[in-house]
């Protein structure tokens, strides 16, 4: 098992952001983490990446407690960029290479080229969407075991979105899994193996996309709209 | 190959149907080599596991076969391909007749209209 959460809870004050989460993820899967705003998606991802500590319960990634050893094998794309905007793309690559043993400059340069992004360009002069692409390229150019992508395609145009999804499909290996949180369900639905529905900090559904379509005769997107109707 | 998916049925079933159709219309010919799972998944923009599942099922049906070192191929059994074509045609006929029944036509009337068309 790549990831195991047991009775995981996270409180902000007396508000429960995650409520007794039991979750197991296998290797070699692309999993959608879906839920409305405030359902706990980002909190869960931040705990898995080691940025937040749980209030109670335990989490193991590849049989290790969250810490330095798991950071080596977890590649995390945050909602917002943390790169300094005075850097050039090339410098961000060097930065990542310094930090992560498993970072491949070659893979990153290849993807940058495909998306027509110049390594000499400064982040400051880029559009928001292009910066997001750079950030995702950095994250996907690691040879990690678990990729945590928090809203990876929100800000980019549909053509780049397709390329990014293709990149995710072709870049991860059988030993790794990708957890994607997003609102753009119909865009990612075809690349997902499994989906997890989060509602008020509880997992209300964990199923394969095929099973959902078979059982409900509708897309995950349609089911989501039904389950989370306001 | 051009892929087109609806959002209500499982993707692997739609992949199976689309590959069957490509074989039946001769877009894929007997003995043709297929792209790798990863390449096909990337082309169709679907999950590699889903593509794998569809191909395994087609293999079980005998429409594809794997040669351990050189990859995956369309069956060279032309009788099998002819039978597939017939089967798909039958599905279309059944579909046509059931829609005509819905509109209040008998099978005979439907056949008559088809002939005059």
Image (cartoon, rainbow, N blue to C red):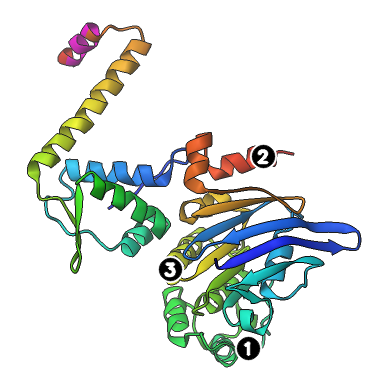
- Whole-angstrom CA distance, mark 3 to mark 1, is 34 Å
The residue beneath circle 3 is A174
Which segment did they paint magenta?
B108-114
The residue beneath circle 1 is A87
B113 and A20: which one is in front? Answer: A20
Q: Which chain carries label 2?
A: A
Q: Which of pointers 3 and 2 lies earlier in the amino acid sequence?
A: 3
* Dots 3 and 1 on the same chain: yes
Q: In which quarter of the image is residue A8?
A: bottom right
Q: Residue at x 16, y 13 (%)?
A: B116
The residue beneath circle 2 is A227
A147 and A182: which one is in front? Answer: A147
Badge 1: few (under 14), some or many (20 or more) residues near its Cα, within 10 Å? some
SS at badge 2 = helix
Q: Which of pointers 1 and 2 lies earlier in the amino acid sequence?
A: 1
B16 and A89: which one is in front? Answer: B16
Q: Which residue is drawn at 51% across and 75% down?
A: A140
- Whole-angstrom CA distance, mark 3 to mark 2, is 32 Å
Q: Is residue A16 visible?
A: yes
What number of labels is visible?
Answer: 3
Q: Is residue B77 above or below residue B34?
A: above
CB contact under 8 Å: marks 3 and 1: no
Residue B20 placement, left or right of A211: left
- Whole-angstrom CA distance, mark 1 to mark 2, is 43 Å
């Amino acid at each position: 098992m790549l990831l195991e959460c047991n009775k995981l809870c996270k409180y902000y004050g007396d508000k429960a952001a995650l409520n007794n989460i039991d979750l197991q993820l296998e290797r070699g899967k692309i999993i959608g983490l879906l839920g409305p705003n405030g359902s706990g998606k980002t909190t869960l991802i931040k705990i898995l990446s080691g940025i937040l500590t749980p209030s109670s319960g335990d989490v193991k990634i590849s049989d290790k407690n969250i810490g330095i050893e798991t950071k080596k094998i977890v590649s995390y794309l945050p909602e917002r960029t943390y790169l300094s905007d005075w850097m050039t793309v090339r410098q961000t690559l060097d930065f990542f290479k310094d930090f992560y043993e498993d970072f491949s400059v070659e893979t990153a340069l290849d993807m940058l080229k495909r998306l027509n992004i110049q390594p000499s360009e400064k982040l400051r002069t880029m559009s928001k969407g292009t910066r997001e692409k750079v950030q995702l390229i950095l994250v996907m150019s690691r040879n990690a075991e678990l990729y945590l992508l928090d809203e990876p395609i929100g800000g980019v145009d549909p053509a780049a979105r397709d390329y990014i999804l293709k990149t995710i499909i072709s870049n991860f290996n059988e030993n790794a899994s990708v957890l994607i949180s997003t609102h753009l369900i119909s865009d990612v639905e075809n690349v997902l193996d499994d989906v997890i529905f989060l509602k008020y900090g509880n997992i209300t559904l964990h199923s394969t996309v095929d099973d959902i379509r078979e059982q409900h005769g509708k897309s995950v997107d349609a089911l989501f709209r039904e389950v989370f109707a306001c | 190959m051009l892929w087109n998916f609806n959002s209500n049925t499982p993707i692997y079933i739609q992949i199976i149907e689309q590959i069957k159709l490509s074989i039946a219309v001769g877009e894929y010919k007997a003995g043709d080599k297929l792209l790798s799972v990863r390449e096909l998944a990337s082309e169709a923009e679907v999950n590699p596991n889903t593509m794998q599942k569809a191909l395994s099922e087609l293999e079980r049906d005998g429409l594809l076969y794997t040669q351990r070192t050189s990859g995956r191929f369309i069956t060279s059994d032309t009788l099998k391909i002819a039978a597939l074509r017939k089967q798909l045609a039958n599905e279309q006929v059944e579909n046509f007749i059931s829609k005509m029944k819905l509109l209040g036509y008998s099978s005979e009337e439907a056949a008559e209209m088809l002939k005059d068309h």
